Amino acid sequence: MSDLGQQYGSVTVLDRAPEETGLEHGEKVASRREDAASPGGPDALKYYLREIRKTPLLTFEEEQELAKRVARGDEDARARMIEANLRLVIVVGKRYINRGLPFPDIIAEGNLGLIRAVEKFQHQRGFRFSTYAWWWIRQSIERALVNQVRIIRLPVHVSEAVNKYTRAVRNLTLRLGRVPDAQEVAREMRISVHKVGVVSQHIRDVSSLDTPIGDQEEVTLKEVLSDENASSVNSHDDDRRQRHILEWISHLPATERKVIELRYGLNREDPQTLISIGKQFGVTRERVRQIENQALDKLKNLARNRNIVLNDML
């Protein structure tokens, strides 16, 4: 991922994703995540960018050890892993500037994707976390951009309520480490649970961006909107990186290649679960796991024979 060596403002981002604010005590984690979710105006954003430089990089070994602890439910390790990759969110997020969301909101949405990546990362595969997290961060930001299009369709007063609801859910998710329920959202917004239900219903009532369009129903409106808006200055870097990865896995048999594409979200989609992939292939989740492991072993052998570090490719 050579494009991780780019800069945003005064923040230099290296090949391995650096850490965030570097606050050390567990009792400060919740407020730190909430601050990270909304860097605020220009001064707050400058301060945020300056602060996230202060935490040292994680080595691959440290990354693996933290991931093991996260898998055991260690909240301190989870917080550290999130902190260790906030600058990766900046690198991904700057590609979406001038696309309809203020940059602080882009950062906030990217941070949500980062949290999801930390929770779902499987260290046993031996891959770099930054490569895995890249996709979750990007998908989270792009989903927020699409949702912004949905909000524009609503009346102004409803749009404002939806925006407040979205911010409340986002902040609570960061604070609690999970998706909040209706009562928690109501307390955060200082409105009744009934009103929370009304707002969420407005969101559901908007025409679905996942509705298939066209005769073959293979393309969704969300995909069309995403493609039309994908003209950032650095988008060709993503495309080039995507082509390299897809070329690399083209050495695999068709079934193994498809499983890897689905598991890692290599075709511009969210990474899928073993169960979801199993349903598509008509096999058990355990069989999908076996196919995935076979494919990874083959890729590692190819990498070893060609003197290539597989972690740099996937």
Image (cartoon, grey):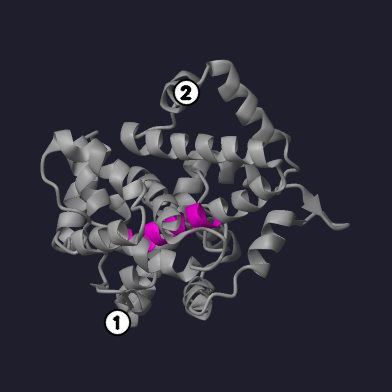
Please indicate, yes or no, whether residue 128 appears anywhere in the rendered image.
no
Give the side of residue 129 with respect to residue 210, left or right.
Answer: left
Q: Quadrant of the N terminus?
A: bottom left
Q: Amino acid at mark 1?
A: Asn
Q: Residues within 10 Å of mark 1 (few under 14, many from 20)?
A: few
> Closer to the camera, 116 or 256?
116
As drawn, the label of residue 181 is: 2
Q: Quadrant of the C terminus?
A: bottom left
As drawn, the label of residue 307 is: 1
Q: Residues within 10 Å of mark 2 (few under 14, many from 20)?
A: few
Q: Residue at x 38, y 72 (%)?
A: 313
Q: Amino acid at mark 2?
A: Asp
Q: Are the two marked residues, 1 and 2, in contact with CB atoms closer than 8 angstroms?
A: no
Across and down, in percent, residue 119 comes to 35, 42
Query: Up-down: is 14 above or below 90?
Result: below
The residue furthest left is: 24
Mark 1 or 2: in front is 2
Q: Secondary structure at mark 1?
A: loop
> Closer to the camera, 233 or 250?
233
Across and down, in percent, residue 144 comes to 54, 51
Q: In this picture, which residue range is highlighted in magenta?
A: 126-142
